Image (cartoon, coloured by chain):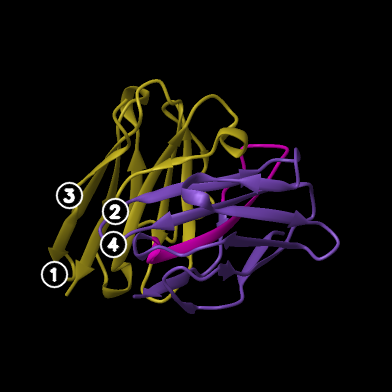
Chain colours: A purple, B yellow
Amino acid sequence: AQSVTQLDSHVSVSEGTPVLLRCNYSSSYSPSLFWYVQHPNKGLQLLLKYTSAATLVKGINGFEAEFKKSETSFHLTKPSAHMSDAAEYFCVVSEWSGNTPLVFGKGTRLSVIA
Amino acid sequence: EAGVTQFPSHSVIEKGQTVTLRCDPISGHDNLYWYRRVMGKEIKFLLHFVKESKQDESGMPNNRFLAERTGGTYSTLKVQPAELEDSGVYFCASSQGGQGFNYGYTFGSGTRLTVV
């Protein structure tokens, strides 16, 4: 069985400072891992994905995440937060081997302070 | 390319009434998924269509929920009769071929359902 734990329900950062959103996963098989973002009144947008290639994954809007198998982590980072980054972020796991359902974390709400 | 379209965007109904949600996937995407987020909980899988066939409906909560995808194009999700605990945001997603895990899934904006 797969599961995802997002370690913080809410993170607040100042504009221009680094962002770290933490995610740990559990999977019986080689996982695919995703980060999605949801801005208010918008759909879920794919930020980046890991599918067994490079462990450091670069996504859109300057975000990146590193897959660490030994730590079962897939933390999302960004060097410098922008006001437009304020949104809810979801870490998601799926089995690599098939079209299995996505398993979502509870989400982390990111606030960016001017 | 048009994205995944869901409507209505919001629906408020009384307990016991029927509501039908619709999802139009990206053209050519054989895979269509329904997910739901109830208040304060994770987004959870409901079911998965491949074309018009139900591939996996293990997440459907009970028989008050009926999903269809006639002709393998758009899908509807009917809740009949609606209960208070059905309130939440219903998301639809689609992916091409059988490789959603590789290409990623495209989600719609969701339908916010409120049962009063």
Q: Which residues are magenta?
A: A85-102
State which quarter of the image contains the C terminus of chain B: bottom left
Same chain? Circles 1 and 3: yes
Same chain letter for marks 1 and 2: no
What element does badge 4 sit on? loop
Host chain of mark 2? A
**Which subunit holds the residue at mark 3?**
B
**Label 1 to label 2: alpha-carbon separation:** 25 Å
Q: How many marks?
A: 4
**Residue carrying label 2:** A42
Alpha carbon distance from label 4 to label 2:
5 Å
Name the residue rendered at 34%, 75% in the picture. A114
Q: Secondary structure at mark 1?
A: loop
The kind of residue on which mark 4 rests is Pro
- Badge 1 amino acid: Glu
Residue beneath disc 1: B14
Circle on res. A17 = none
In the image, residue A41 above or below residue B105: below
Q: CA distance from mark 1 to mark 3?
A: 16 Å
* Spatial separation of the CA atoms under disc 4 and disc 1: 25 Å
Q: Is residue B14 above or below residue B70?
A: below
Position of B82 with respect to A109 (left or right) is left
- Residue B3 point in image, percent of width and height: 32, 34
Q: Label 3: which residue?
A: B8
